[in-house]
């Protein structure tokens, strides 16, 4: 699995766990709904760390909590 897919899946997982809609996440994180949708629907495959941090703030979690999953730990090196 590639990094983009793991990031997208983690956002979807957190939306479900927190019972949040894309709109609610956008309101809580100050990230425009279009930016969240672009990440989730593949138009933005390289979201910046500041955007991810803002979404973490909206979810009420830290960056460490966002990235602390087996999926992130198992990612292979992108550059070979």
Image (cartoon, grey):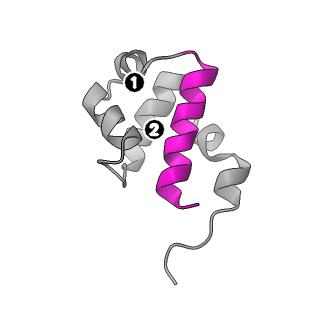
Residue at x 50%, y 16% (from the top left corner): 20
Quarter holding residue 54: top left
Image disc number at residue 53:
2
Quadrant location, the N terminus: bottom right
SS at mark 2? helix
Is 20 left or right of 50, judged from the image as shown?
A: right
Query: What residue did someone put label 1 on?
Result: 29
Residue at x 59%, y 18% (from the top left corner): 18
- Is residue 32 in sight in this rendering? no
Residue 13 highlighted magenta (yes or no)? yes
| Residue toward you, 28 or 41 | 41
Question: Mark 1 Cα within 10 Å, few/some/many (few <14, many 20+)?
Answer: many
**Alpha-carbon distance for marks 2 and 1?**
9 Å
Q: Magenta region's main secondary structure?
A: helix
Question: Mark 2 Cα within 10 Å, few/some/many (few <14, many 20+)?
Answer: some
Residue 78: where, in percent of width, then height? 51, 72
- Is residue 48 in sight in this rendering? yes
| Residue toward you, 54 or 3 | 3
Residue farthest along the right direction in this orientation: 70
Residue 56: where, in percent of width, then height? 50, 32
Residue 34: where, in percent of width, then height? 26, 31
Image vertical order of residue 42 relative to residue 21, above or below: below
Image vertical order of residue 22 relative to residue 53, above or below: above
Residue at x 70%, y 46% (from the top left corner): 69
Q: Bounds of the magenta span?
A: 1-19
Q: Which mark is first along the chain, 1 or 2?
A: 1
Residue 39 highlighted magenta (yes or no)? no
């Amino acid at each position: 699995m590639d990094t983009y897919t793991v990031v997208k899946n983690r956002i979807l997982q957190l939306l479900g766990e927190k019972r949040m809609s894309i709109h609610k996440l956008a309101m809580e994180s100050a990230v425009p709904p279009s930016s969240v949708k672009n990440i989730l629907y593949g138009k933005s495959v390289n979201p910046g760390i500041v955007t991810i941090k803002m979404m973490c703030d909206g979810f009420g979690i830290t960056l460490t909590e966002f990235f602390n999953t087996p999926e992130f730990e198992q990612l292979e090196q992108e550059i070979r």
